[in-house]
Image (tube, rainbow, N blue to C red):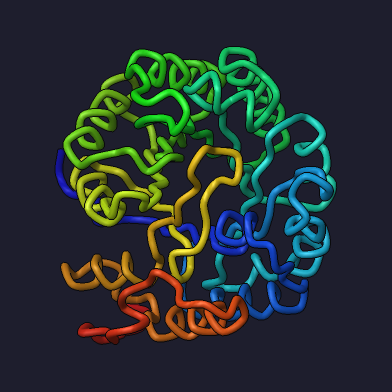
Amino acid sequence: MPLNKDIILQEVGIRDGIQGEPAIVPTEKKIKWAEELLCSGIDIIQLGSFVRAEKVPQMADTEILFRHFSGAAGKPGAAKFSGLVLNEKGLERGLKCGVEIFCMGSSASETHSRENTGMGADEAAGRIAAMAKEALSAGKTVQASVQSAFGCGYEGPVPAEKVLAIVKTYLEAGVLNVGLSDTAGHAHPLQVREMFAAVAKLEPKAELSCHFHNAYALGLANCCFALEAGVRYFETSLGGLGGCPFIKLPSGNVCTEDFVHTVQRIGLREDINLEALIAVARDAEAFFGRTLPGAVMKHGSIVGFKGKK
């Protein structure tokens, strides 16, 4: 498959990046980070998830964030905003506060599915499909992903047939933006190539998305193989923050600055201001009071920002 040069970047640091952090990030700090990300040229910013505050305290202000930025998406060149929903109540909340892009998904791992949603994998996939139909009928964009698509921290390998069956469920619901998420960080590059080729074979018109975690230091390599496999949407997190708190061994996400630096070195997305991304990551590092995994923020960039073309 030819290299997909028209790639879209979704920054998930304000949601996935901080959801498991013990130090609560104030709403004002999240707004500051989002505003700086808007100025960097990132395409999509995931502002939060519609979950119970007592379960994930970091997400208690998700509605506040969406209402604050409700007019920002209409500005020329501005990023769009996405929100994660896991159930019908979350979708209802998201529709009320003006979410543009709904990210939703279910796990191919039975154990992870029950840890994350309290439902078995098949039940969760069916409910996500129904939710996707409702969101699409409301005129919203839907991105549906298969979590633990490359392996599970509880169960180990996950059969490809199980992953593809969930993808088929999404496609039958009318969702064309479908993704594979490496929730436990078990993916390796050849597996990434094979899995996305299999998804593309199911539906050649599908818009493919990926979300990799960096447990075994293969996240960036997996992104490169996904790019080669025709993936268009990439989810990354500022500073390399993040990881699902409902898996056995959470690990950080692929670092946004490192991924942008990588694609800019091969001539892609030179319109994104890498220095602006680095500044946000450094601010996050200062807030949390520890060194974050990102490499480019430590060593500096060796590519130049060319601005919008």
In the picture, measured across the screen, residue 227 lies left or right of residue 88, that is left
Query: Can I make out residue 95 in this image?
Result: no
203, above or below 78, in the image:
above
Front-most of 146 and 270? 146
The image quadrant of residue 198 is: top left
From the image, which quarter does the C terminus lie in?
A: bottom left
164, above or below 227, in the image:
above
In the picture, measured across the screen, residue 201 lies left or right of residue 78, that is left
In the picture, measured across the screen, residue 97 lies left or right of residue 279, that is right
The image quadrant of residue 74 is: bottom right
217, above or below 255, in the image:
above
- For the point 39% across and 86% down, the residue is 275
Front-most of 86 and 252? 252
Q: Position of residue 216 (x, y in %)?
A: 30, 49
- For the point 26% across and 44% down, the residue is 226
Q: Position of residue 10 (x, y in %)?
A: 48, 57
The image quadrant of residue 305 is: bottom left
Q: Position of residue 246 (x, y in %)?
A: 60, 39
From the image, which quarter does the N terminus lie in?
A: top left
* Number of numbered discs: 0
Q: Position of residue 299 (x, y in %)?
A: 28, 85
Query: Can I make out residue 295 in this image?
Result: yes
- For the point 23% across and 40% down, the residue is 188
